[in-house]
Image (tube, helix red, strand yellow):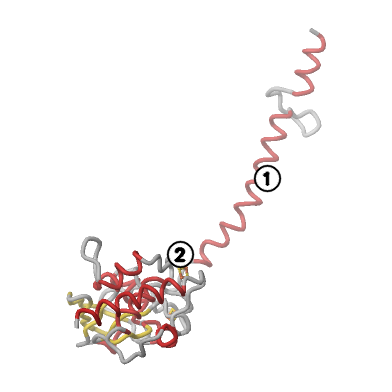
Amino acid sequence: MSNDTNKNKGLGTDAPSGFGSSSRRAFLSRLGSVGLLATTAPLARAVPAATPDPASNPSTPTPPGTGLPVTLRINGTEHKLQLDPRTTLLDCLRENIGLTGTKKGCDHGQCGACTVHINGRRVNSCLSFAVMHEGDEITTIEGLGQPGNLHPMQAAFVACDGYQCGYCTSGQIMSAAALIKEPCGPHDSDVKESMSGNICRCGAYSNIVAAIQSVRQKKLSAS
Ligand code: FES
Ligand code: FES
C-alpha cells in the first residue's frame, strides 16, 4: 500500500506545482510541447518563404487582366490565355493548362523529358516561350494517344517494357514518335544517335530502342 502510494507519488498523476514537484505526466507533457515548438517554429517561419512570389515566378498563372493575350492550339483544342511573356511552353502546359504528362526534368534543354511536338516536329518545351506558338499545332503526350486508343509508339513502349520509373517516358515517346517520320538509318546505333537528347536515368535504353525498332519494322512491312 505504502509502495503504491510512493509509486503514485513518484510517477505522479496530475498534482502540478513547481518543476521539482511536478508530475511525470506534466513533465513529459511540457517536454512534448517544447519538442513540438522546436519542430514547428522553423516550419512556421519557412512557410511564407516557400510561397512563390508571382512577380518573380513566371510559371505562376498570370492574374486575370494581366499578361499578353495569346491563343494556343493544344491537342486540337484552342486555349485563350493571358501569359507572362517569360512563361516557357513547358510551364504553360503544366501550370496554366494542367497537362502534366509533359515532364520537367532539367529545365535546361538537357534531358528531353519535356519533349512535345510543334507542327509535328519534336521540341524541348522548356527552351521555348509559350507566346511564340500562336498559330502552331502543339501536341503533348495526352494528345498522342489515350488508354484504349494508344499511338503505336505508346503501345510498343508498353509491349517492350521501355520504361522503369516512367519519368522520362512521355518525352521518350514524343521523341520516338517524331523520329519515325525523320531520316534515320536502320540500325540500333542510328536510333540511339537520334534519341541521344532523351536521357533515361533508369537506363531503360535497350528496351526503348527495341520499342522504336518494332514500330519502324511494322511501318516498313506495311509499306
Ligand atoms: S526539362 Fe526540358 S530538356 Fe530537360
Ligand atoms: S524510366 Fe526512369 S528515367 Fe527513364
What's the amino acid at mark 2?
A: Gln
Q: Ligand 2 closer than 8 Å to the CB at disc 2?
A: yes
Residue 13: quarter of image: top right
Q: Residue furthest front?
A: 221
Q: Residue furthest top?
A: 1
Q: From the image, which quarter does the N terminus lie in? A: top right
Residue for point 75% across, 29% down = 22
Which label sits on residue 164? 2
Q: From the image, which quarter does the C terminus lie in? A: bottom left
Q: Residues within 10 Å of mark 1 (few under 14, many from 20)?
A: few
Find the distance from the CA under tag 2 to the CA under tag 1: 44 Å
SS for dot 1: helix
Give the percent coordinates (x, y) of residue 164.
46, 64
Q: Nearer the viewer, residue 219 or 147?
A: 219
Considering only order in the chain, which callout, 1 or 2, is on the residue closer to the N terminus? 1
Q: Ligand 2 closer than 8 Å to the CB at disc 1?
A: no
Which label sits on residue 69? none
Above or below, 156 against 221 in this view is above
Which label sits on residue 34? 1
Q: Nearer the viewer, residue 74 or 71?
A: 74
What's the amino acid at mark 1?
A: Val
Give the percent coordinates (x, y) of residue 201.
51, 72
Quadrant for ligand 1?
Answer: bottom left
Q: Residues within 10 Å of mark 2 (few under 14, many from 20)?
A: few
Residue for point 63% across, 51% down = 39
Q: Nearer the viewer, mark 2 or mark 1?
A: 2
Give the percent coordinates (x, y) of residue 124.
38, 84
